[in-house]
Amino acid sequence: MHVGIGDIRKSKGLAKSFDWDGPYKLEGIDLEGPLKLDLKVTNAGSRVMVTGPLKTAVRIPCTRCSEDIVYPLEVDLEEEFLPIHSEEAMTRAKDLLDGTFTFENDKVVLDELLRQEIEAAFPIQALCTENCRGLCEQCGTNLNRETCQCGPEEGDSRWAALQDLKAGTSVPKPAKKPKK
């Protein structure tokens, strides 16, 4: 997706609107339903500013059970684009982690900005339901759908003494070393 900016590049302060409401595909992201953009693209002199809301929904896996859920997203975009061959863009390009967006041929390409903003808005822990039971650690059964046949997990034998303390049983004390 791109926005032609030849008309606003003529003078600092000129702006235009860019709206999108429809299906869209972004690599690595499963959009569910339409992508809605209501952007303002402004000539800010040495750069072009892109601002405005983004609304969509994404299909992502539940953190606990891995079932797909549809998660609605609303993001306010505010990003600058520099001319690709400008001195500032070249200087920033030396820092590989800078993340500067550039444009060329009077065209701002929005795809990478949209992808990054949507991914950054993903929840840290997406749950299908608040009380999702997740997957059995032993057999992988989805515990929201069925009960697995696994028995209680045996603990690491190195922690057995602590389990005895928790259970209230006594643990033999180590023998004292003779004095010399």
Image (cartoon, rainbow, N blue to C red):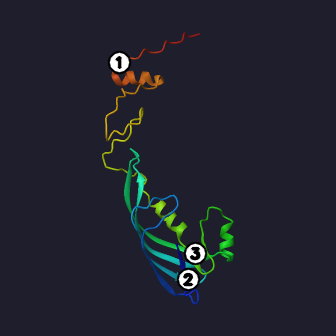
Q: Earlier in the sequence, mark 2 or mark 3?
A: 2
Q: CA distance from mark 2 to mark 1?
A: 77 Å
Where is residue 173, by image quadrant? top left
Please give the name of the residue rendered at 69% of the width and 66% of the height, measured from the top-left corner. Answer: 94
Q: Mark 3: give few (<14), some (14-19) or many (20+) Cα within 10 Å.
A: many
Q: CA distance from mark 2 to mark 3?
A: 11 Å
Is residue 54 found left or right of 27 in the rendered image?
left
Q: Earlier in the sequence, mark 1 or mark 3?
A: 3
Amino acid type at circle 2 is: Ile
- Tell me where residue 104 appears, x and y as whole percent: 63, 77
User: Looking at the image, is mark 2 or mark 1 nearer the viewer?
Assistant: 2
Count of number-bearing discs: 3
The circle on residue 81 is 3
Amino acid type at circle 3 is: Phe
- Tell me where residue 111 appears, x and y as whole percent: 53, 68
The circle on residue 5 is 2
Please give the name of the residue rendered at 38% of the width and 39% of the height, measured from the top-left corner. Answer: 135
- Mark 3: secondary structure: strand
Nearer to me, 105 or 87: 105
Q: CA distance from mark 1 to mark 3?
A: 68 Å
Please give the name of the residue rendered at 56% of the width and 79% of the height, measured from the top-left corner. Answer: 48
Q: Mark 2: give few (<14), some (14-19) or many (20+) Cα within 10 Å.
A: many
User: Looking at the image, is mark 2 or mark 3 nearer the viewer?
Assistant: 2
Q: Which residue is mark 1?
A: 169
Please identify the quadrant where the C terminus is shown.
Answer: top right
- In the figure, 18 relative to 132: above or below? below
- Tell me where residue 25 appears, x and y as whole percent: 48, 64
